[in-house]
Structures are given as C-alpha cells and as structure tokens.
Amino acid sequence: MAKIIGGLVIVLLLSMFVISCTGSDLPTQYGLVQRHIINCAVPESVANWQERELACRAEGRCINPGVTELQEIAWLAQGMLDHKKDDVDYTQTSCEANESQKGDCEDFGALAYRLLSEAGYPESKIGMVLLVDFGNHDPVTGSYFGHTVPVVYIDDFDFWILDNGFLTFVVSRASEFLESSRLSLYCGYNLTEYWIY
C-alpha cells in the first residue's frame, strides 16, 4: 500500500475529532461553504503547532525579505524548502522550516503562513487548510489522502490557495481550483482559531 502522505495521520485524528464536536453530517464538497469556527478542544497536533509557532515568532526573527505579492510569496516559500515527504505527525514551525530548508506540505504551509503574516496580511485572513481526497482511502490505515495548503481569504466564502507545487505552482482561487479537483475542504487553522467546512 502507498505510504501515508503528509497530513494523513492528521486527517484520521481530525475526522474523529470533528465528528465528536459537530456530528457526522459534514459538508464534504466545496460549494462556497462558509468556514465555521468551532468551540471545542483543538486537535493536539494543531494546538502544539500553534504554541510552538507563537514561541518561534516571539524570538523576533523576520524571515520575509520584503515580498508582499501572493505569487511571489508562494515562489519564495517553494524555493526555501526542498520537498521531503514524511510520515510523521509533526508540523515544523516557520523557524524550523526556515532552518532545515526541507519539509512536506504542512511545513511549507507554516513557512508560507509566516511569510504572509510578515508581508502584512491580517492573521484573521490567513491560515492553513486541509484538503482531503475522500475517494483515495487506504484500507490498511483507514486514512484518506490529505494535503495541507496555506490560504488567504478573499471573503467568508472563497480564498487563494498557495501550494508547494504538489498540486500547482500557481496561486489559485479555491472556488475555481476545487471545482475541477477530487479534493474537498475539510478543516483549517491559524495561530488562534480552528475551523471546519
């Protein structure tokens, strides 16, 4: 069987978590659905990253050399990391990703998220979103294929996707990209919030 691709362990944990917090009638297809901030315990892996990322940022080191345009930020982050797939349920902080210069999709997301923040994008408009292919199920692990992407919200119903090159090298609008993709929105988070779709 195919190895778990970055984010799959999180998908399994999040699926158990989301169902326990919201019931099992989750929307699984992108239909311009609004994100819903949830008021229950955040998954441990997300809370752990939020805490470590806040500590990293408290160090005061800036990693953005002054890039502000979305596509340039995506290309900068793509150039800063050598894509290395891992099967570990650990998302590096932006400091760790910047130092190691390697990582998978969630590590790219953390790095691009930080670049966006330093470029002046409001924290309430940026985050990382987990996309899931519910048609690609691993019967051994019970997991689905998942992919994490950093995003910038345009409004409450749409956002720009910055990918590490796994899906696309071009910044894409979610409402257009996901319409022709097998991937579905699942959940997202930033430094202070966690949400489902």
Image (cartoon, helix red, strand yellow):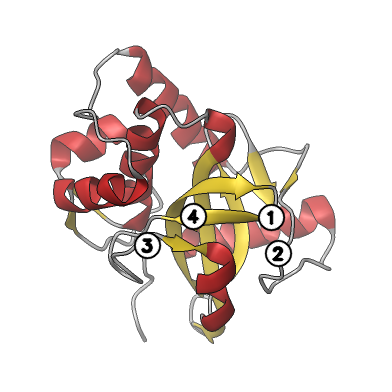
Distance in Å between CA atoms under marks 3 and 1: 26 Å
Q: Which mark is residue 157?
A: 1
Q: In the image, what residue occupies the spot 30% across and 13% down? A: 59
Location of mark 3 (residue): 6
Q: In the image, what residue occupies the spot 37% across and 69% down? A: 5
Q: Secondary structure at mark 1?
A: loop
Q: Quadrant of residue 44?
A: top right
Which quadrant of the figure contains the C terminus? bottom right
Residue 39 in the image: state x and y as whole percent: 78, 37
Residue 170 in sight here: yes
Q: In the image, what residue occupies the spot 41% across and 52% down? A: 89
Q: Nearer the viewer, mark 2 or mark 3?
A: 2
Q: In the image, what residue occupies the spot 33% across and 42% down? A: 69
- For marks 3 and 1, the one nearer the N-term is 3
Q: Secondary structure at mark 3?
A: loop
In contact (CB < 8 Å): disc 2 and disc 1: yes
Kind of residue indicated by mark 2: Leu
Location of mark 4 (residue): 160
Distance in Å between CA atoms under marks 2 and 1: 5 Å
Location of mark 2 (residue): 32
Distance in Å between CA atoms under marks 4 and 2: 13 Å
Q: Nearer the viewer, mark 3 or mark 4?
A: 4
Instruction: Give the camera-side residue of 107 and 87.
Output: 107
